[in-house]
Amino acid sequence: MDFTISPRIEDYRTRIARFVEDEIMPLEEDRSNYDPHENIRADVLECLRDKARGEGLWCLQLKEETGGQGLGKVGMAVCYEEMNRSIFGPVVFNAAAPDDGNMQILEKVANDSQKERWLQPIVTGDVRSAFVMTEPHPGSGSDPGGMMLTTAKKKNDRYIIRGRKWFITGAEISDHFILVARTSDDPRKGLTAFLHSKNTPGFRIERRIPIMGPEEHGGHCEIVYEDMEIPAENVLMEEGDGLKLTQIRLGPARLTHCMRWLGLSKRCVEIASEYAHNRFAFGERLSKRESVQMMLGDLAMQIEIGRMLVMKAAWELDRGGFARKEVSMAKIQVANVLHKAADTAIQINGARGYSKDSPLEWIYRYARQARLVDGADEVHKMVLHRNVEADGRRFWSWDVAEA
């Protein structure tokens, strides 16, 4: 692959970097800009979103005919990393989960009428959305195909939904929902995806689940379906394609998480380096100490390894591949380096890092979820082992260009 980026992508990266530096980062220092769940306050966010739209930095990940700029996965990797230099960044550009992944899957698989009804309001920023798959024990988690308990029973031209979901990100403020439920016991074709609104009878939010870290807008909610009726026209793809849809959505979504997490990892290094350069102890700057230099040097290397893995996966997706093993490797590496970057930066900053005087403690609490969401580390390592077992030495093969 070629690691150079186009002048067009560099132009977007530069403009995003300036926007984040000038418009977003100054807001982190004022606690009045935070909502009760430690994210950016809704009214402050809307002002920034209006500015991002005005500067042509809105929904860059989507096709131009959908309302985006068609940057592709490589372009997204460059720009998303820049967006998440700030803890508030991605949502300002309509590039935050779960809307980001929901827009991309709807753009890819929804029919024209579904795009008009369900996708476009998310693109314009008029509504928010949620992806409804995970269930409480003993229901579906990392194995939705084998463990999903929520059912969708067809009755004439409608489906009757019964079940319970939890840790549904953004549910409390979402208007549009993509729901995955069981329609048969077929191990490969037993799940189906549906679209519904928050006002559909039979749907309710049981609770907003308290978590250790700062929360996305709308929190992580437990949802109950009690004989909710969904018309057949709201089926995404075809009946039985639910597992296929989750595979199409979650692979790229895992990668976009990594793109954003790299930005936060670099921010941790930035804060730690600045503090080490300015802090004196025992007659010298912290930055002159070999132990500190080794800590920051190792972080720089680990972040760069993550960037290479993300770029390889993005390149593979852009050329039409599935990038399954590449995405798994990127997910493991970047999730762990984010946690390490926050921990190391706090260690270098000492008591200041442990306080709320910098965003490090915010990032640290947020980072712990990275090794769990969209597949725990152990699941991805297990998947990689299966690939090694199946491919043998071909696991590490290079693609050969045509003569």
Image (tube, rainbow, N blue to C red):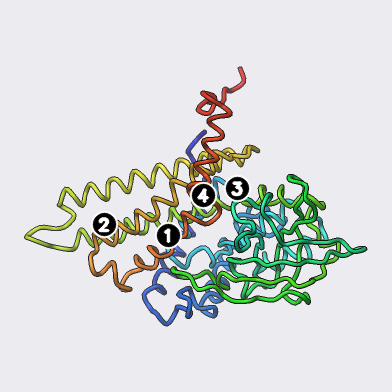
* Residue 308 in the figure: left or right of residue 185: left
Earlier in the chain: of badge 2 and badge 1, it is 2
Q: Is residue 278 above or below residue 76?
A: below
Residue farthest to the front, as pictured: 138
Mark 1 neighbour class, 10 Å CA radius: few under 14, some 14 to 19, many 20 or more: some
The residue at which mark 3 appears reads as 251
Q: Amino acid at mark 1?
A: Arg
Mark 4 neighbour class, 10 Å CA radius: few under 14, some 14 to 19, many 20 or more: many
Q: Residue at x 54, y 53 (%)?
A: 256
Q: Amino acid at mark 2?
A: Ser
The residue at which mark 2 appears reads as 273
Q: Please tell me whether mark 3 or mark 1 is closer to you in this view.
A: 1
Q: Amino acid at mark 3?
A: Gly
Q: Please tell me whether mark 2 or mark 1 is closer to you in this view.
A: 1
The residue at which mark 1 appears reads as 368
Q: Quadrant of residue 219?
A: bottom right
Q: Is residue 108 above or below residue 135?
A: above
The residue at which mark 4 appears reads as 77
Numbered disc 1: secondary structure: helix
* Residue 341 in the figure: left or right of residue 49: left
Question: CA–CA distance between discs 3 and 2?
Answer: 33 Å
Numbered disc 2: secondary structure: helix
Question: CA–CA distance between discs 3 and 1?
Answer: 20 Å
Is residue 328 or residue 32 the one in the foreground? 328
Numbered disc 3: secondary structure: helix
